[in-house]
Image (spheres, helix red, strand yellow):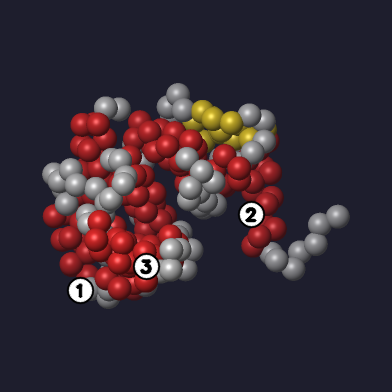
Amino acid sequence: MDVDEVWRTIDAERASLADLLDDLAPAEWETPSLCGAWRVRDVAAHLTLAHTGLWPAVVEGVRARGSFDRMIRDTALRVGPLPPAEYGRRIRAMVGSRRTAPFVSPVEPLTDVLVHGQDIAVPLGRARPVPPAAAAVSATRVWGTAFPFRARRRLAGLRLVATDSDWSAGEGALVEGTTGDLLLLLTGRTAAVGRLSGEGAQRLAAAAGRRDHPTRRTP
């Protein structure tokens, strides 16, 4: 995808996500998302901040004492709670803009809206297909960048192969799935592990099961 295609995809994903948010029932806003310790409302709040300028970002970084994770969490929590209609309105207002947060390329907001869209949709049981070509662009960036997901280290010993695009990465036991599901895996989400196949996917499922049962002991 060239830059224009990336931006067209961001626009389409933001518009469709805004439509989804406009359709949420009150209880759905409080549903735990796939993003650890965040409700659906908090993820939506984070997505409204994609146009944060340099100075506000510096201020938030100082408040968070240099912790990137804390800064992301705190800025999202400071947004809300907003009236439910306001989240979709703010996200929809960014459609057509080519502005990014400081020091990032268009691939970062693309990854944000693809992954966080699933953070919202999956626990709500809402269908939200991930475009394979766009997911491949994001997956390549996440795989090739250590911070913040450390995907290459976390998934060492696995060969990731997409079934709906020509994307692949890594070496070792096979993990097959859609590009969108592999992108969730790369960014630390385990929700899609059950939809993956291959010897490596079985290892991931077993590891996820052990995390879900902290008192379980293995030989």
Q: Are marks 1 and 2 in contact (CB under 8 Å)?
A: no
Residue 188 x, y percent position in the rendering: 52, 51
Residue 29 x, y percent position in the rendering: 33, 69
The residues tagged by marks 3 and 2 sit, at their Cα atoms, a distance apart of 35 Å
The residues tagged by marks 1 and 3 sit, at their Cα atoms, a distance apart of 28 Å
Q: Secondary structure at mark 3?
A: helix
Q: Earlier in the sequence, mark 3 or mark 2?
A: 3
Q: Is residue 192 above or below residue 55?
A: above
Check disc 3: other Cα within 10 Å, few if <14, some if 14-19, many if 20+.
few
User: Foreground mark, 1 or 3?
Assistant: 3
- Rendering quarter of residue 21: bottom left
The image quadrant where one finds the N terminus is top left
Q: Secondary structure at mark 2?
A: helix
Disc sitting over residue 208 in the figure? 2
Q: Which residue is mark 1?
A: 83
Q: Which residue is mark 3?
A: 62
